Image: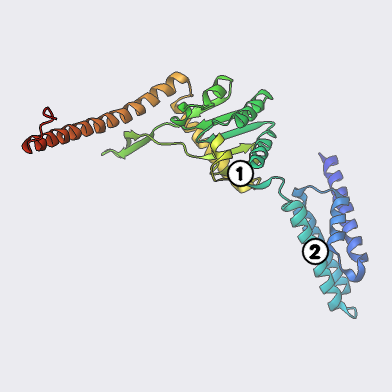
């Protein structure tokens, strides 16, 4: 342990010496952005060391300003040193603390090129691929998701229980191929009982309407785009691709919350999903049948009234 601390101390002393020499030898004491970038490349620092380096640079500038404080033209030299310190801070921020984004794109559809770029990002998944979409019926995208599963990536799919049963849906095909898949559950309604406890008072059918993906927990894809042929070739859709840590983390938390909630309800299977869809479809058909019956009653009454008017006018249908 002591040897490791000694080695770290020696490395820090070497960096401090190089920084002090560079600040002292820079023309007029001014350190350019290019010189700062060259220094960082030579030192090969990690982002976690940026704060330490900036602290060291500040101490070196203070020491140089103390030594030059009584010389003629000290004010100009101090200004130059402060400018050098600002250049170093800016370089540290841009190169180490806020490096250029490795994934940033805005896709608009319909567009074959945008669809291919989307599939290209999904295909980069090596460890995890979390997909949360309302509809999945695009064969090209489904194959890309399945390929990630076959490569050994941990793929999870969250989708809507109703659209999973639509004609052309590829959800069950992916689930049966081994992709961990869940569909949304009904929204549970709770009430506070007299004793202060929470009791379930009912449930309401709902849709899982999100459209986002997380690649390796580092890249976020989100927007209005559904994973369907129409979305890529006909509809006006959009998708944002970013590796911004804040938004990746927030969407990751949202995915984990939905996964826990829906997983408790059920894993998707043809039988379980079919039962839920049949219940929803039964209610729709009953409402449709009721409306159809009402129209038949109205039509029958209309026909009877028309016949009565013809007979009253001496124009019996039988006579015609």
Toward the front, the furthest residue is 320
Q: Which mark is residue 248?
A: 1
Q: Residue at x 69, y 25 (%)?
A: 151
Position of residue 217 measured from the top left corner of the image (x, y, whole percent) = 64, 38
Give the quadrant of the C terminus.
top left
Disc 2 versus disc 1: distance between alpha carbons?
Answer: 30 Å
Q: Which mark is residue 131?
A: none
Up-down relation of residue 191 to residue 42 (above or below): above
Could you tell me which secondary element the residue under label 2 belongs to? helix
Give the quadrant of the N terminus.
top right
Position of residue 128 measured from the top left corner of the image (x, y, whole percent) = 64, 32
Position of residue 252 measured from the top left corner of the image (x, y, whole percent) = 57, 40
Toward the bottom, the furthest residue is 72
Q: Is residue 212 visible?
A: no
Q: For residue 295, which quarter of the picture?
A: top left
In the figure, is residue 259 to the left or right of 202?
Answer: right
Sort mark 2 into few (<14), some (14-19) or many (20+) by Cα contacts within 10 Å.
Answer: many
Q: Nearer the viewer, mark 2 or mark 1?
A: 1
Q: Residue at x 39, y 22 (%)?
A: 275
């Amino acid at each position: 342990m002591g040897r490791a601390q000694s080695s770290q101390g020696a490395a820090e002393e070497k960096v401090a010496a190089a920084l002090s020499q560079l600040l002292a030898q820079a023309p007029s004491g001014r350190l350019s952005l290019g010189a700062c970038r060259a220094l960082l490349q030579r030192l090969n620092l990690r982002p976690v060391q940026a704060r330490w380096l900036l602290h060291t640079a500040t101490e070196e500038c203070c020491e140089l300003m103390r030594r030059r404080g009584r010389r003629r033209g000290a004010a100009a030299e101090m200004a130059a040193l402060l400018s050098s310190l600002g250049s170093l801070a800016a370089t540290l921020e841009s190169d180490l603390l806020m490096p250029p984004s490795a994934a940033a794109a805005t896709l608009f559809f319909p567009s074959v090129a945008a669809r291919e770029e989307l599939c290209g990002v999904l295909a980069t998944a090596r460890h995890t691929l979390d997909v949360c979409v309302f509809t999945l019926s695009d064969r090209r995208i489904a194959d890309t998701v399945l390929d990630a599963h076959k490569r050994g990536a941990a793929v999870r799919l969250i989708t809507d229980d109703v659209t999973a049963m639509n004609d052309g849906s590829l959800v069950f095909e992916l689930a049966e191929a081994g992709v961990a898949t869940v569909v949304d559950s009904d929204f549970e309604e709770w009430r506070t009982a007299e004793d202060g406890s929470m009791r379930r008072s009912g449930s309401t059918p709902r849709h899982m309407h999100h459209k986002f993906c997380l690649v390796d927990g580092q890249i976020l894809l989100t927007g209005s785009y559904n994973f369907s042929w129409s979305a890529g070739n006909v509809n006006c859709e959009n998708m944002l691709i970013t590796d911004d840590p804040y938004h990746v983390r927030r969407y990751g938390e949202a995915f984990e919350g939905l996964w826990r909630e829906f997983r408790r309800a059920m894993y998707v299977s043809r039988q379980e999903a079919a039962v839920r869809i049949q219940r929803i479809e039964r209610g729709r058909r009953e409402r449709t049948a009721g409306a159809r019956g009402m129209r038949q009653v109205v039509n029958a009454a209309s026909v009877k009234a028309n016949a009565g008017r013809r007979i009253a006018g001496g124009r019996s249908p039988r006579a015609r």
